[in-house]
Structure formats: C-alpha cells, structure tokens
Amino acid sequence: MTSRLSTRGLARFSSRRPWLVIAAWLVALVISGVVAATSLGGVLTSDITLTNDPESLQGFDLLDERMEGATALSETVIIRSDAATVDDPAFRTEVDRVAAGLRALPEVVAGLVTYYEINASAPDQAGGLVSEDRHATLIPVTLTGTFDEATERFDQFEGALHGGAATGYQVLSIGDVSVDETFNSTSESDLQTAELFGLPIALVILVIFFGALVAAGIPVLLSLISIGVAVGLTAVVGQVFELSFFVVNMITTIGLAVGIDYALFTVERYREERRRGLDKLAAIEMAGATSSKAVFFSGLTVVLALLGMYLIPSSIFFSLGTGAILVAIVAVVATLTLVPAVLGLLGDRIDWPRRRNYDAATAVRQDALDHEAIHRGFWGRITRIVMGRPVVAIVLGVGLLLALATPLINIERGAAGASSLPPSDVRSAYTILERDFSAGRLAPVRIVIDGARTDPDVTGGIDRLLTTLSSDASVVPGSTETIWNAAGDLAEVQLLLTVDGASDAAYAQIDRFRDTIVPAAFGGTGIEAYVSGESAFNADFLSAVDAWSPAVFVFVLGLSFILLMLVFRSVVIPAKAIVLNLLSVGAAYGLLVLVFQEGVGASLLGFQQTPAIESWVPIFLFCVLFGLSMDYHVFLLSRIKERFDETGNNQESVAYGLQATARIITGAALIMVVVFGGFAMGDLVAFQQMGFGLAIAIALDATIVRSVLVPAGMALLGKWNWYLPSWLQWLPEIGIEGPPRRLSSQTPSPGSLAGEPAGD
C-alpha cells in the first residue's frame, strides 16, 4: 500500500478527494489574504540593518541613547532659478514663502534655517547654502516624529513646498523621507510592470507548449495561489522579525518562476503517462511518483541554497531569503497536492479546446515511443551531435562561459542612492545638489566620541580631529560641526564629504578615517570614537558581505553536493553539477558587469548604466540561481537515471533523458526568463540588475549547460557518472526516478549514437 506521506501517496489521495484538497487551499488563500491585508503593511520597512554590531551601528546606538534629536529625520529643500539669483528680491520672496509654509506645520517640521537668516547673523557660515553661481540655495529642514510618522505626513510637507510656487523656480526636496518614498513608489510600479509583462507572456508560452487553454492555466493558477499564501505567511513572520518591503517583490518573482515551472513539469508528465496508456488516476499517481518527487527534491535544493542568505548578518538578506523560501515551500506543497486534485477533477478535459484520444495510445508499442524520443526531431539531432563529439562540445561550451565571465574581474559594488533613481523630482534634486553643492550632504559622516566634556583627553582629541579635518581635501570646507549632548558626556563631530556618500570613494574615506585620522586624534587616550553615518553603514554592509560570502559559498555548495549525492548515489554527478552551475553563475556575473557597469548595450536594453553593482545582488544571485538551476539539473538527471536503471546503457539513457526533458526544460526556462525579464524592465536599478542577472543565467543554464555540457560530460564519463565509493555504499537509497518499467526486448539501442556498445 502506498504511503500517503510519499509524493505518490499524496497524488493518490489528492486525485481521489479533489474537492477536499481544493477547498483546503481556498481556505488557506482566504486566510492569507485577510492576514496580509490587515498586518503586512505594518511589518514591512525600508530600513536595512546589520546584526553583527559594526562600528557604524555602535555609533548610531550611542546617539539614540544619549543624544536627544541627533538621529532626527532631515530633508534638504532646494530652490533654484535659471534667471534670478539669491540677491534678487523675487528669489528671497520665494524662499520666504517656502519657509513660512513649512513653519506653519509644527506637527511636521521641527525646524529649518534659510540662507538669508544665517547671512544676517553669521555671514561666514552662510556660504554653504548658496551655489557658486548664486542661482540656487538650500534650506536644511528637520522633521518631527518617527520615520513612519514623517512618511504619513509627507504630503503636507510637499504641499507647503509647491502651494503657490512662483513661475520660473524649481522647488525640490531630497532627504530621508523623500528618497524612501520614491524608492517605495517605484518599487510598487516595477512590481506591477513585472506582473503585467510576465504573466500574459508566460500564459501564451504555456498555451503554445500545451496546445490547450486549461492545461496552460493550471501552472499560472498554482503560482498565484502560492504567492497569495506566501504573502500571508510573510505577514505572520513579520510579527516576529523585521522584514524589508522588497520581500513582496521577492515572493512574486520566485513564486511566478517556480510555481509555473513545478506545475508545468507535473502536468506534462501526467499527459506523457496518459499517452503511454495509463488511465487517469494511474497517470496522476505515476506523475506523483516521478515528476512530483523531482519537484520535492528540486524545491529542497532551492530552499537549501536560499538558506545561505541567512548566514549574512543583514536584514535585507534575511528578508529576501525568507520570502523566497516561503513561496518555494508553498509552491512545492501545492504541486504535490493541488495539481493532482485539479487533474483528478478535470482529467483529460485539461486539453480543452482540443480533444485527445489517449486510449488510442495503448496501441502504440512502448519501444516505438522510446525509439522516436531518442532519434527524432531537433533535440534528437542535437543529442547526436553533442554526444558524438563530447570533447568538442565541452571545450566550446566551457570556453564560451569563461569568456562571458571575464568582465567579472572589474566588478565594483555599491549601495543604491538617489543617483540610481529613475527620472523624478528627487533625482532632479540630487543632480542639482551634486552639481552645485555636494552630494555628500545627503550622508554626513558622524564621528561619535564617548567621553566627558570636562576630560582634557576628550577635548584635546576633538581639537586634533578638527584641525586635521579642516585641511582634508575629502571634507567640504566649513562643513565640520561639533555637537554635545545635554549631559556633556557624548560628542558628535559631523562633516560632509565632497563625494557621493554611496560611492566607493566615500567608503575609502570611511576606511581612512577609521584607520588613520581618528586613531591619530584619540590614540593613547583610551577614548572610544566611532565613525558612523550612512556612508559608514554602507561600508560596514559591504564588509559583512565580503566576510561572510565564503561561508555562504561553502554552505550552499556543500549541502547541494550532499543532497545530490544522496538522490543519485554518485559523487561525480554532484561534483559536475556544482562546476557547471558555477560556470553559468560566473557568466551571469560577467554579463551583469559588462552591461550595467561598463554600459555595453545598456541603453539598447533600456537599462541605466551605474558605476557599481548593487552590493547585495551578486551573493543574492548566487543563492537563487544555484537553487533554480538545480531544478533543471534534477529533472534532467532524474529522467536519465530512470532510464539507466531500466537499461544499464549510459549513452542511451543520456540521449533519452535529454530528449524527454529538453522541450519542457526549454519551455520552463523561457517562462522564467520572461518573468525575470519583467522585473528587469522596471525603473529601479537594483531590480534591473536582479532581473537581468536571473534571466541571463537561466537562459545560459537551459541552453549551454543543460543541452550541451551535461549530455557531453555524461557521454564522456560513461558509467563513471554513477560512481559511488564503496565506503559510501551505506548511504540510503532515496531515488526520484519512480518505479521501474518493463521494457520490450525489441527496444532498439542507440549505441551507434556515439559508438557505445548496446550492453554498456
């Protein structure tokens, strides 16, 4: 009797009780929708935190604890006119209008100062608020309340800026809230773009693949349900852990990709078994014992790979990993239960509007079907070419991937700032700020000194620090300011950099401050001084990624090796899979650098050229791509192993497995490319890089790797593919190949395909 806990048992149970299973999923979907609608918005944040307590966070914590108002939110209002200067009365009238409007909102604005006010009392300090050509001025504004409160009231802030604005003046704002609001709104827009682009095209591909509307709708239905339930689960997780608002984009991306793919593999295996002559329920069971089992282990590889992101002490990786893992798990469970239930309910009606007579398939001999699968069509020709000349295929395939990976040596990583935003008021404000003032104003460096104002070591160290900074070329002249808390036991030295705070140049300055300037000022005094601020945090983030990336690689590669070794009882298969996946990921990295960083084809593809790749993108791509590419590897190898167990003929098994899966893997990969390409069409550079990297890696993996390098390598290695050392023979036999079939003795051997004897 089949256990219900097996994939075959779940398929049997679900197909015989379809309404019960479907009702259970509908209830789960409704509950998830209610939970998400009532809870999700309150648990998502745009903040990124580090859990390894770096120097920047130690400084922030001291400011939060002992410097009242030191971490208050700020906005920089920019007023510019091409015709007038700050010396014209009309310009001052416009500045006074904006200042009065903001001061009329005490619940929104805590304080502000204008150039004219400072110039009247301290002219030597007013220069930093006026551009060199005197056509622009800045109004530094401090906001009230928490970040969420400031965000809720930001419409009032913007209304005060633009209400009654004079003709010929640009009034813009850039800062903590405006940048975050722009990122959030653009993120939501990109998500809608991805869905509007990806879903319809994926559905068209499925219709073409299946030749049926109903069958095409099943994978889309499963992916949407998986996304809905995963979002509800995320809202629950968010009650305990802080999650980034990017988690919803992550759930949608991975949910569409794996949900459609998993259902596609299972539905097509059901139709294959019907063509072989099995009745409806038996075909569902066989699909459950084979494709659904492969889905289970493929999903497990995805989850294991994504778990690697948890090793990096950052909330963004935790959020992205959590969203992807939840939707992958839900998609697997739905494939094991919901798909068999739908197949059990609809049966052969999934082929509507076509009507297939599957019963006629019983008249076709199995050996004829197998012979046709090996020798016929485009994939049959590819198989003969690749396996006939495996060395040539490997040299060309590996050479191409290595060539594509070459630009990786020039990779630069950074953090998204206002400079990476699409055209908007905030982006315009950044352009003016960078050109006429200093982009470093958006991310002041904050050196926090933990010591008493009465201690001469403290005051002497601060004096030495200020003297050094006053002549430092990286510091905006006159921008240095010292602030003490009310208790006089904590000081903060603020300064502005002459470079963008989200650039490599800024991170280099942070390292220099920490390694030389601050130690020179306070060395030997025992005074603790912390270099903090947004730029320092970004530098710490990059350091954390660099420090933990090797552990992520070892973790993901090690667990993947163990899982594949258990599944296929071979040490050669997992070793080869790891090498091939690293090649495809490396090629994706190289193309990412070539397009975004070096700008080759960026404008043609509608992408924004950037000086650096988003710091979280490379390690994120590694974890996601390693998991997703293993999907195809598991499906391909499971069919090869299934045939090898039946015949013992390696060459025939490889040819059969490639031909049996090439069409479905290509279709599934094409859908993934479309889904990821939808995200690459967004406006946020981070999503462009993520979508492009995922899409190009999947395309390379499904073509060069799965269709050329895998069969060529397996043809070259022969029975060594299945080598397992004798001292590992105790490992349990998991197997995902399903029950063996009885083959006809007349089944032709394709040994001539590559010159291998039939008995090998």
Image: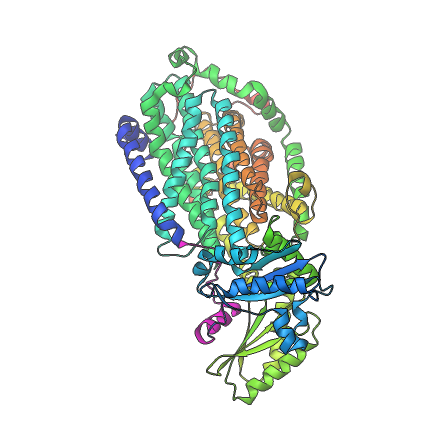
Viewer-side residue, 644 vs 218: 218
> Is residue 754 shown to the viewer in this render?
no
Magenta stretch: includes residue 61: yes
The answer to whether residue 454 is left or right of residue 610 is left
Tell whether 57 sits left or right of 415: left
Image quadrant of residue 706? Answer: top right
Q: Is residue 599 magenta?
A: no
Q: Is residue 120 above or below residue 192?
A: below
In which quadrant of the rendered view does residue 540 lie?
A: bottom right
For residue 571, above or below residue 290: below
Q: Residue 368 at x, y = what percent? A: 48, 14
Residue in view at x 47 percent, y 81 percent: 486
Of residues 288 and 444, the one nearer the viewer is 444
Name the residue located 39 percent from the left edge and 54 percent from the top edge: 43
Relative to the observer, which residue lies in front, 68 or 598?
68
What count of labels does the image hold?
0
Residue 323 location (% of width, % of height) = 43, 47
Color style of the picture? rainbow
Q: Tell me if residue 416 comes above or below residue 331 in the rendering.
A: below
Nearest the eye: 125 or 445? 125
Q: Which residues are magenta?
A: 43-67
Could you tell me residue 239's position as x and y percent? 35, 55
Q: Residue furthest right?
A: 133
Q: Which percent across, then down, holds residue 710?
A: 56, 34
- In the image, taking residue 327 as reference, residue 9 lies left or right, namely left
What is the quadrant of the N terminus in the image? top left
Residue 199 visible from this viewpoint? yes
